C-alpha cells in the first residue's frame, strides 16, 4: 500500500496492491491512516529541520512534530 500526503497533511492519493485488497475494510482503513500519519509527520519533521537551519533556533518550531513523533508513527505502521 502507498499513500501520498501533502505537506499540510491531506491525502493526495492511495494505491492499494492486490494482496492488500483481500484484507477487511477496517484493517485497510487503519493502515491507510497510519501511512498518512507517517507521511505527514515525515514532511513536518523535514520542514522543522529546514526552519531551524534557516533561523538558527528551535524557538520557531515549538509545537511542530519532532523526529520522536515520526519514529512513533513509523513504529505503529510497522506493527500492523
Image (spheres, rainbow, N blue to C red):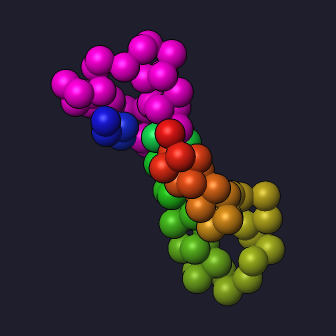
Q: Which residue is drawn at 64% across and 78% down?
A: 52
Q: Residue at x 62, y 67 (%)?
A: 67
Residue 42 shows up from this direction: yes
Where 15 falls versus 66 (above or below)? above
Q: Which residue is drawn at 57% across and 54% down?
A: 75
44 or 59: nearer the viewer: 44
Residue 41 shows up from this direction: no
Span colored in magenta: 5-34
Percent coordinates x, y for residue 65 in the rendering: 68, 58
Where 74 falls versus 3 (above or below)? below
9 magenta-colored:
yes
Q: Which residue is drawn at 67% across and 65% down?
A: 68
24 magenta-colored:
yes
Where 37 falls versus 45 (above or below)? above
The reply, left or right, for residue 76 in relation to residue 1 is right
Where 7 falls versus 63 (above or below)? above
Percent coordinates x, y for residue 26 in the rendering: 51, 16
The reply, left or right, for residue 61 in relation to residue 43 is right
Percent coordinates x, y for residue 77 in the rendering: 51, 45
The reply, left or right, for residue 32 in relation to residue 19 is right
Percent coordinates x, y for residue 71 in the rendering: 59, 61
- The quadrant of the picture occupied by the N terminus is top left
Amino acid at each position: 500500500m502507498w499513500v501520498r500526503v501533502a505537506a499540510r497533511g491531506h491525502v493526495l492519493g492511495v494505491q492499494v496492491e492486490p494482496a492488500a485488497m483481500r484484507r477487511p475494510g477496517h484493517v485497510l482503513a487503519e493502515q491507510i491512516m497510519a501511512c498518512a500519519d507517517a507521511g505527514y509527520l515525515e514532511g513536518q519533521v523535514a520542514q522543522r529541520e529546514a526552519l531551524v537551519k534557516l533561523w538558527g533556533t528551535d524557538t520557531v518550531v515549538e509545537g511542530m512534530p519532532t523526529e520522536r513523533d515520526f519514529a512513533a508513527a513509523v513504529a505503529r505502521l510497522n506493527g500492523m
